[in-house]
Amino acid sequence: MSTLTIENISMRFDLPNGDHVQALQDVSLELQSGELLSVLGPSGCGKTTLLNIIAGFLAPTEGQITLNGHRVTGPDAERGMVFQQGALFEWMSVRDNVSFGPRMAGKRESDWRETVDHLLDVVGLRDFKDKSVYELSGGMQQRVALARCLANDPDVILMDEPLGALDALTREKMQGLVLKLWKETGKTIILITHSVEEALLLGERLLVMAPRPGRIHREYRLPFADDGVGQDLRAVKKNPEFGEKREEILSMIWDMEEEIMGRAEEVEA
Amino acid sequence: MIVLILYVAIFVVAFFVVRFGLRKYRQVRDFTSLKTVTFGDESAVRPDRWASVLSVLTIFLLWGAFTGSKWVPVHAPGPFVGDTSFTYTLEAPDGRRDDATVFARVFRLGEEVSAPEVAPGDGFAKDDALIVGAWRSQLLRMDQNDEITREDGARVVAIDGRAIAPGEMVRVADGTVTLTPRGSLNFAPAKGMQMEPIWLPPPEAVVKRVGELAQTGYQNFTLWEHLYWSLYRVIMGFALGALVGIPLGYAMGLSDWFRGWFDPIVEFMRPVPPLALIPLVIIWAGIGESGKIILLFLAALWIMAISARAGVSGVAISKVHAAYSLGASKWQILRHVIVPNSLPEIFTGARVAMGVCWGTVVAAELVAAEKGAGMMIMVASRFQLTDIVLMGIILIGVIGYGIDILMRKAEKWLVPWKGRV
């Protein structure tokens, strides 16, 4: 069982003028295998910094992260990442993008062909596997990014606003796809998002973060992700409980935003 | 001036003729043709191929027309050629006047000519004969056969009945006559509006030169050998420059130490025009092949290093992060992410470098070389062989253009994703 433990993470950036920014303060979290955690918060609350630390792109100033009992010190294939803008390799075909991880690991084509073809089927890109990625639409590119991440079979998938740049319709379809993949593969997923609705729909657990310093404000356990699997997402959204939760969290984030604005005004005055 | 006015006139007339005269033959029904906003929409501005063809034709037409080319049906008025005459009035010291006629024969330079036969006529001023080349002028010692000469105090007071004083000029039938301060006559036949071949030869002379030089050569080498050597130097210099510059650029983009070490050198050498290095390279390496190749190597090196460095910095960090998260090693990231991602930048740099190298090699050959396109036109210009010079310039232009087209084709083939991400 893979467990992701985040212990007392703090992140402090020193500025050249002697000031400093406390991006994260004392964040602790434990994630069991197969959990889907969505992270929500106003801008500047350190969500992306937290994700980059978990991915191993940044070293925290304090605290540590352990996955499966060993400490995270840098990026690794056990923690896959899906970026907002796909971050695909334009010089490769769709298939080469998806098989990038296995190929870099030195696996033979016979070892990964089946997995890659299966994943292309799952994300509905079987007919596009020989296309160049720049010929695809934004939603298709994001599906390639998902498949590429899954093809590498990571323990944890980190998603940094993966659906943020998509239009509303494509986004809804992709949300269904993410839920489906999560259930099918049983991966641990951390999903960062700006959309309260998306966080509620997809998150089994939901973390609301507060800014300045970035910290965990509240945590929820939600039933909607389980409901959403195999069900129409719009039906889930009609659930009165869903609406209540959405209003509750929205007003919470609004309050935080207003507080920031208020503080900014004080500083200016 | 007249050429400029003509050029603008052709430009305007061609525009109206093609736009309005040929409208119904040029109906294009594609998406862009349906755009109503074209002024300000760069993508809707496509080169009018008619205009391109007419532009090139116009240049040749004007060139031919003003050089008397046989290939062009219309010509600007040429220089006067043939027989003409004018009279001068000689005044003796005692005030008597007598007219004499000068029969001038104007001939094309290079043609055989004999002086017209002239009977001396009566009076103390005798008739004269004169031969003049077209575009040239000829001093006439009119009084060498006269009975009363300048030594006796006679002087010319009128040409064709019009009074003239020393230093003045009078227009006659087919040219002008100037009375020199020393009292003799200078006849310049009308030049017309065409250019003299030693300034601007007609197109056919240039083409003829191509054939001639391709067969017999010039300065010990045939035309193709001259061009081959220039191209060879460019390709060698560019290849060496790219071979060293691209890895250097990568190293500068990937390592603090390399960046710090080479930054001052690259930043210093970049603004130094390669032409400024020619004297130093000649001192160090002489005017032979190695000197040229060193120069072109230096010209290409910095451009390639900077473009490779820019290519590395242009890699979106998310792509590198993605590759690390997928388990790639540093070497694999270099090979599969950084190098392909920097190719568009490198191609842009390579195009610039090829252009600079081609310009530099010609300049270097102009300064000192035993063979090469630049050397060929430089030597030809010393002997006023304008047709070789023109031919050389045209071929240099064509080759430079050809190189750029090849580079663009290669770019399209190797970097199809450029500009589409």
Image (spheres, coloured by chain):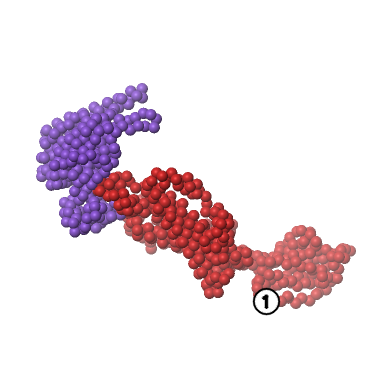
Depth check: B416 or B136 in front? B416
- The C terminus of chain A - image quarter: top left
Q: Where is residue A158? Give x, y as percent.
A: 22, 42
Q: Tell me the shade of chain B.
A: red
State which chain is coloured purple: A
Q: Amino acid at mark 1?
A: Glu
- The residue sitting at the front extreme is A70
- B347 relative position to B95: left or right: left
Reply above or below: A265 against B274: above
Residue B66 in sight here: no
Residue A255, located in which quarter of the rendered image? top left
Q: Which residue is rendered at x = 50% and y = 66% of the image?
A: B229
Q: Which residue is mark 1?
A: B112
Q: Position of residue A227 (x, y in %)?
A: 10, 40
* Residue under the image location 17 percent in, 54 percent down: A115
Q: Position of residue A75 (x, y in %)?
A: 26, 43
- Residue at (66%, 68%) from the top-left corner? B134
- Left or right of A34, for residue A131: right
Q: Which one is nearer the viewer's eye here, B57 or B155?
A: B57
